Image (cartoon, coloured by chain):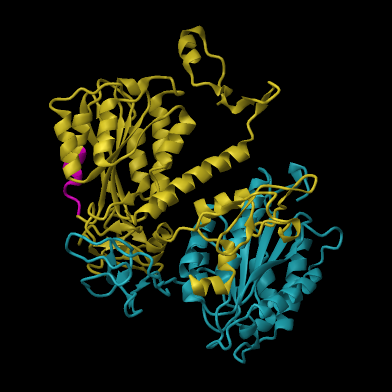
Chain colours: A yellow, B cyan
Amino acid sequence: MKETRETSKHGREHTQTRGPGESLQEDESGLLRPIDNQALHHAQYRRRLRSLSSASATSRIQKGLIRYLYLVIDLSRAAGEMDLRPSRMVVVAKQVEAFIREFFDQNPLSQIGLISIKNGVAQCLTDLGGSPESHIKVLMGKLECAGEASLQNALELVHEQLDQIPSYGHREAIILYSALSTCDPGDVMETIQKCKNSKIRCSVIGLSAELYICKYLCQETGGLYSVALDEAHLKELILEHAPPPPAIAEFAIANLIKMGFPQRAAEGVISICSCHKEAKFGGGYTCPRCKARVCELPTECRICGLTLVSSPHLARSYHHLFPVTPFDDVAPLFVPNHRRPKACFGCQQSLLNPGNLPGRCVTCPKCKQFFCLDCDIYIHESLHNCPGCESLRDSKSLS
Amino acid sequence: MTPVSSKQYTDDVSLLMVLMDTNPLFWSSTATPFSFSKFLSQVLSFLNSIILLNQLNQVVVIATGFNSCDYIYDSSLGHGNLRAETLLQKLEEFVIKDEELNKQESVDGIGSSLLSGSLSMALCYIQRVFRSGSIHPQPRILCLHGSQDGPGQYVAIMNSIFSAQRSMVPIDSCVIGSQHSAFLQQASYITGGVYLKPQQLDGLFQYLTTVFATDLHSRNFLQLPKPVGVDFRASCFCHKNTIDMGYICSVCLSIFCKHHKKCSTCGSAFGQPQTSVSTSNQKRKAPDN
């Protein structure tokens, strides 16, 4: 956290900032030392991975790959608080931007819409759509806060919007709630029941303190409730919602969705695109049903309403269905030295600590290759392939 | 990697990861217009010229075998003797080991080599270079590939491509076989690399030096081979036909050309509320597009 000294006017807020002193810890002899960040980071990641894999092992849960998500951003007076610098609102907007990009990277077939709460009224900033840029642009233009927050109005609007979407889609709402109260026109409990009946999964990320009503909402609708401690924690909490959530089979009815796979139009052809209503030169895609031209995929054809995707968009989601098995920790003493490879199978990094002591490493239960901790994280969070298993023909024919 | 002062790392310092296809079935097949030793001598000259271009350039070679993949050369490890000829011994060891691992008696046709494995390894290595600090050579991957695509590797290769795209690592491909490779076409298109299938393999060295030796910065000023039209249409899982319009299972994203009552991949019944939980452990067929 980089901060310069503020003037005395902001002195009070300054003392309240959530301290930068967390990156130190006391060792046995009472000396302050920086925390071993790598080990800590890895431990956190392992916990996350284990909780994910245990959840999917206990009951055979599907993943909701086609999601319709409304992001509700609280822009009430409380969003102007400056306990996060420069204000909650700005920090939230920054994290929402990162989230929207990550969301579309992981869920190319899904759609997001934005809703703001201001002056006790919920307002639709953007309709459900698949283009990250347009959402981010609208949000950045609407960053002003005023008045009270109303949970009920927000939920009513979410319900109204999500009630129309097709039954195979997974309906979700993520509420970024700054206020400590809700100012509602009617009974919020009834609205919560309505959302529950419509199978809308509501999650709340609080920015101030835990609220009973938010907790109740998440419990009832099967969402997650968390309260952010600081900016880094907020980022972590919001990005947790980017991978597709486990879905219960009854929540979304399986269905066949008609989709088109448009071909890229020939270079050097001038045509009018249906999305921007402009004449464009070259590039673009042609809808196979109505032959309208669209600029980018994935999208919905403006003319005939057909969902248009390309095969890589589908392939981008496949790793959610076939995750890499979690690697096992290797206890340094249990594996005799001669059986231990000297270098990580993936990146060739030495697995020995200075002084030729065996360092910490992990092993894949399938191919029995050893990996360093960094590769472990990269393989499970970005690559989604085990290099060891992929470079063995036997394991492939077995699996 | 030896620490070097930041001034020396200009924008044209490259890390070249070369994935070399050593599939013995491909190299011994009569359709290959080119012998492995000829190929090797041209590639070695190319690797040496990369190292020659800039003293900080780094070359790593991974052998893509039929049964395994392994690192066979890393120019940052050698002290003094950096010449790429040192990889020959490791290559020989690798080829012998690769042959020992072979369990299948006979293979139809050429068979595919394990491109997904070597791509994954190369990406792990590149991540290590990224971790090494803010100053590092600009990485790129070059696939020297001849074998045909293995449909079973589709998902793994696509995963690697997307990971490379996220880390902004271009995948260049030089196809030395007789057929185009749909996997590598997509890989180069998505990651912004160059895809090339040389017409005259005798002049491979010239193709390599004129097209693939250029660093990422210099590519902005050059007219490199333009991407040919990549067909991103999908093929259906039921008949393997390439289709313009189709039906997608909302649960597992399988592609069908006609309306079915039940998904053949995940077993979900369509059009009615689902009662039984799907059995997702059935092996999914990967589309071979």
Q: Quadrant of residue B142?
A: bottom right
Is residue B157 left or right of B25 when viewed as pictured? Answer: left
Q: Nearer the viewer, residue B279 or A306?
A: B279
Q: Is residue B114 above or below residue A18?
A: below
Residue B168 visible in image: yes
The answer to whether residue A313 is magenta is: no
Point out the residue furthest to the right here: B80
Point out the residue furthest to the bottom here: B30
Q: Nearer the viewer, residue A84 or A301?
A: A84
- Looking at the rendering, in which quadrant would you find the N terminus of chain A? top right
User: In the rendered structure, which segment of residues is drawn in magenta?
Assistant: A158-166
Please state the horizontal and vertical placement of residue B82, each as a whole percent of the image.
82, 63
Q: Is residue B236 above or below residue A208?
A: below
Q: Is residue B208 above or below residue A319?
A: below
Please state the horizontal and vertical placement of residue B256, each as a whole percent of the image.
29, 72
Q: Residue at x 55, y 63 (%)?
A: A366
Please state the horizontal and vertical placement of residue A228, each as a whole percent of the image.
42, 29
Q: Quadrant of residue A197?
A: top left
Point out the residue furthest to the front here: A334
The answer to whether residue A163 is magenta is: yes
Q: Residue at x 39, y 73 (%)?
A: B285
Is residue A321 left or right of A17 when viewed as pictured? Answer: left
Q: Residue at x 57, y 88 (%)?
A: B106
Please state the horizontal and vertical placement of residue B13, each as a whole percent of the image.
70, 54
